[in-house]
Amino acid sequence: MAQVLEFKLPDLGEGLTEAEIVRWLVEVGDVVAVDQPVVEVETAKAMVEVPCPYKGVVTARFGEEGSELPVGAPLLTVAVGSVDPASGGEAPEGAPSTEEDGASGNVLVGYGTAAPAARRRRLRPTPAPATPARRGPATPASPAPAHTVVAVQGPVAVISPLVRRLARQHGLDLGQVVGTGRDGLILRTDVESAIRASSGAGAVGEAPVSPRVDKDGERVPLRGVRGAVAEKLSRSRREIPDATCWVDADATELMAARAAMNAAGSVSGPKISVLALLARICTAALARFPDLNSTVDTEAREIVRLPEVHLGFAAQTERGLVVPVVRDAHQRSAESIGEEISRLTEAAREGRLTPAQLTGGTFTLNNYGVFGVDGSTPIINHPEAAMLGVGRIVAKPWVHEGELAVRQVVQLSLTFDHRVCDGGTAGGFLRYVADCVERPAVLLRSL
């Protein structure tokens, strides 16, 4: 006897309470395997594919694409059992079986089950083509006189949800696109080229968000990433009594040291970026001033000094500002940090970051110099205790060894939580960072 089980939107972690349905990956009548992705959702942190913990036949879907659902709301229902829902007899090969599978308990792709998901199979009525599942709350499919199991091809070689969305917005069949990435992976450039070829258009971008216009002006909803950023920044301002100090530093020797490192490295190896060097300097500074690698437990009225440095760095993407986190940065070299920053930045631009890669930071490095500005007063990334901001490195007149010279100068600014330390600690941290920038050999004492 088949049993209909309800699969609810799982807790995606880190306090996320809702998610927006981007795209359904299954339709009513599909046979799904344990841990097969069934829906693509966008949270305030990232886009993720949500796997179903049951093996069975999808009997209903809930929620339209573009709608938001709270955690715990029904996503879909699955008929689980050893009976073919169409014929009332034995299930065909590959049909659900509670004795074989049951529920997995997994909620995110990549966590737990390592075996690849089985190919999706769809139940279609023999007399006529199956009616596509409707968007929005769905009702269980009506029993048809007879059904046959029809095998379909596996998933298209696409990783990025943004690539899928772009193709969907332009009505492009990804099955007809030849991927130029590794192992035939379809990249955004492949989709853009296919769209241009079919329409004769120029540059291709994502469909713009249409604001609501009334007599007072345009109204753009604060939702998704933009809404999450707004809430976090507001909370930081409400809860953290912050202060900012800054200093100009001569980065000429740092730039020369970077050039020497890259010249001495492997020709085919990755180059060490300025951001990676600054990140390594930050980890050394935090070892000397651990108060800034902490958080405040307001309920217990305690400062919690954290043993590991998980370094966040601000990255601008098409979806807005995100802060990927380099785990255990205190145990990494500048080269290792640079490689991880490059990997996370690429994932951020392609929309592949998971919530786990965007949370858990203990200190943030913000390079706003890429926007061509010298200084800023960063807002602390709650619940952290400090953020270091870095302006552009630009040639300026500077007194060097008693003489006026043209040097590469950068402004460094530190915003810190005044509850965890006073100005002496914050100033000591910033001065140490500036000393390492001006004389990179100072850093060798911390290695």
Image: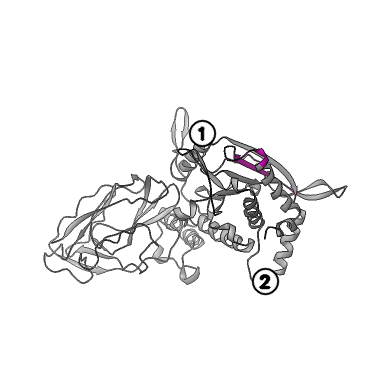
* SS for callout 2: loop
Query: Badge 1: how crowded within 10 Å, few (<14), some, or many (20+)?
Result: few
Give me the residue at 39% from left, 61% from top.
Answer: 111
* Residue lying farthest to the right in this orientation: 403
Q: Quadrant of the N terminus?
A: bottom left
Q: Is residue 278 above or below residue 227?
A: below
The magenta region covers 409-424
Q: Earlier in the sequence, mark 2 or mark 1?
A: 1
Give me the residue at 63% from left, 46% from top.
Answer: 388
Q: Quadrant of the C terminus?
A: bottom right
- Say which of 182 and 397 sits in front: 397
Q: Position of residue 33 (x, y in %)?
A: 28, 65
Q: Position of residue 397 (x, y in %)?
A: 82, 45
The residue singled out by tag 1 in the image is 238
- Say which of 223 and 410 sits in front: 410
Q: Tell me the kind of residue under disc 2.
A: Val
- Displayed quadrant of residue 158: bottom left
The residue singled out by tag 2 in the image is 267
Q: Is residue 176 above or below residue 423?
A: below
Q: Position of residue 413 (x, y in %)?
A: 66, 43
Seen in the image, is 312 located left or right of residue 208?
right
